[in-house]
Structure formats: structure tokens, C-alpha cells
Amino acid sequence: MSELPSPVLPAAEFQRRLLAWFDVHGRHDLPWQQERTPYRVWVSEIMLQQTQVATVIPYFERFMARFPDVAALADAEQDEVLHLWTGLGYYARGRNLHKAARAIVAEHGGAFPMELEALAALPGIGRSTAGAIIAQSSGQRAVILDGNVKRSLSRLHAVGGWPGRPAVERRLWALAEHYTPRERLVDYTQAMMDLGATLCRRGTPECGRCPFADVCLAHARGEERRFPESKPKKALPTRATRMLLLRDSRGRVLLEQRPASGLWGGLWSLPQFDDHTDLQAWLDTHAPGSAIEPAGAPFIHVFSHFRLEITPQPARVECLDAVGEARCWYDPENPAAIGLAAPVKSLLTSLAPFALEVPPGP
């Protein structure tokens, strides 16, 4: 049985309306639209996952300045890649970007494979991202279905259900396939993304300016905000951790690198402990003579699947040269180019509230 709901418009009319709107109102001057190589399109697509354009632009420009091509990215150390990713969040994207670059160099001679299956097999590149890379960089016909496109098609056809459910996703892919043209693929795929990002937005769609307002089923029902349906929510559990802000006599702060997988994988973080007893036991073993200071106020860092209550615990030690494997001293006045977990970066750049003022230099 076909997964395709009855289209609200013939494909040719849908394409005509969309491209006419895009020619006048679409975005034509984004950094990754200049010199549309597979590499630049790929990096932008990964950065734009779960992140708004305005946030991505400066990160993209810094990333391109340091890693202008896939060979430069593959040759870099993961620490440097994650350092430039710090603040974008969802750090697995940065790790997978690095892994995929090395795979492209090792397995494809540094050239992007332009077949959908080969691209989608690379770390962090799914079906929609692979389609965007092909369509945007080569003009070949390839179908995309990112979050913006899902939202627009869900509303246009009043497709019920959470798009993460396989049956709902299949219906949306069928619609995306039906409407995708064989010409002007670069403009069409950008137009579909722009429609969802600038008009058919999540909270406040601007239906009065939409080229499909007269045929949109959700709009006709006055139920724009109902579609697409949200993922069924579960109460987020709360976990607690104490982060040790251990400073030496030179004002440096002790950091340790997280395991490659899991929470903040590969990033540098403050040592974490379940409770004060564990923290004190670690200090007694690894930094004897440390002076514990009053703890900072707890704050919450929210992940997709839980809330982390972080209590900063300042401490001082006169001298501690042997910090062990996967640890380093971090100088806030001369910060190293390493990837930092977001709350750690915030703590390191605002130490004063936790009585960790660095003494002025000579």
C-alpha cells in the first residue's frame, strides 16, 4: 500500500510556487552558499542540525578558516576540532565530522562519494544530509527531509503523529520524493529549508506570507500548531554531580578529558564526583594539602534525556605537578585550544563568583 497521502498540489505546481517564492524571499547570501563544494555543504548541514542559522554562521566561518578542506580536517587532532565546536552543543556531531573526514581520506582518496548509500554510510551522515550534500553541491536529484521540511509537509498535508515514528516518517519521505523536481535542485532544496526556517516556523508560522496558505490543510483547520505532533514527553530525571574547581598557586585549573564515548565524549571537563565524600577522598589521594572553599550555588544543565544539577566546588593546592593521564592544568588567562563542555566553559570564564580570582600578573 502506498505511503503517499493525496498531494495537495501537482508536483509541478508545488515546485513553481515554491521557487517563485524563493527567488524573491529566499536566503541567497549564506556563507556556505558561496563556493558550494561537497565539503562546505556537509559541514554546514551538520552544524545546522538542532542549531539556528544565526548561531552557526560565525562557527562555520571559523571552522572553514582553520579547516578549509576535508584533508585539513582529517589531519587535525580531535581536541582542536572540538575546541572550535565548543558552544555549538551536541558534540557527537563534531566527533563524527572528524571521523567521517578521516574515512573520506582513507577510503575515498579525499573525494566525497556522491552516491547516496556511500555518503549515508559515513559517520553522522544520514539519508537527508546525504541528499542535501548531493543536491546542493552537484545539482543532481536527491531528496531531503530535515526538520524544517518535515514541519512544512506535516502541516501542508495535516500528517498526524510524531515524525520520529517509522510509519509517519515513511509518509513524509513519500511526499518529499513526490515533490522533488529534476531541475533547479540547488534552489529547490534550499527553498524547502528556507520555507520551514523563515515562514513555517515551529511556534509562530507566518501563514499570511506562505505560498501554500490556500491549500495547507493545517491552516484550513486553524491547527497549524498541532502539526507536526511532538515526541511523547517523559519526565526528565535529575542527576547530581560536584565539579571540582581545583586551582594551583599559578591560577591554573585542573581539567580531565572525558572518555571518547558517552556524556561530553572526548571533551575536557572539571573532575566530577557523585558527592562531597568522593571528592574529598580524591583530593586526599591525588592532591594532599588542598584547601576546600565554600561550594558555589548549584545550577542545572539540561540534556535531551536528563537534567544535571552541577555544584561547583572550589579548592586550592600549592603545587601539584604530576596530574596523571588524561589530565592537564588549564590557564584561564592563556586558554589552550581544547574542546570544553559548555557548563565547564561557563565556569572557567566566570570564576569570580566561586572565589577563584586569578592573581594579577607582574
Image (tube, rainbow, N blue to C red):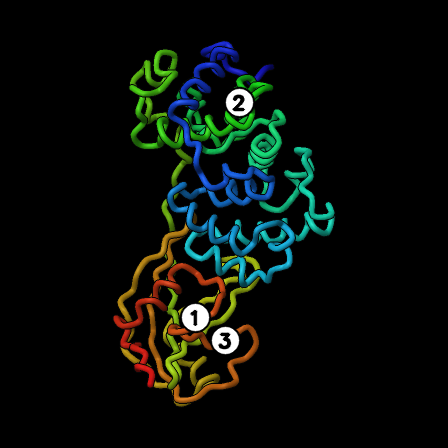
In the rendered structure, the answer to whether residue 21 lies left or right of residue 179 reads left
Q: Residue at x 47, y 14 (%)?
A: 16
Identify which amino acid the numbered label 3 is placed on.
Cys
Q: Which residue is mark 1?
A: 335
Label 1: element kind: loop
Identify which amino acid the numbered label 1 is placed on.
Pro
Label 2: element kind: helix
Cα separation, mark 2 vs mark 1, equals 46 Å
* Quadrant (top left, top right, bottom left, bottom right) of the C terminus: bottom left
Residue 249 falls in image quadrant:
bottom left
Which of the pair 270/49 is nearer the observer?
A: 49
Q: Residue at x 33, y 17 (%)?
A: 219
* Quadrant (top left, top right, bottom left, bottom right) of the N terminus: top right
Residue 242 falls in image quadrant:
bottom left
Q: Nearer the viewer, mark 1 or mark 3?
A: 1
Q: Residue at x 40, y 41 (%)?
A: 52
In the rendered structure, the answer to whether residue 226 lies left or right of residue 95 reads left
Label 3: element kind: strand
On residue 176, which mark appears? Answer: 2
Q: Residue at x 41, y 51 (%)?
A: 303
For label 1, the crowd category at 10 Å Cα-Cα, with few meaning under 14, some 14 to 19 and many 20 or more, is few
> Could you tell which of marks 2 and 1 lies nearer the N-terminus?
2
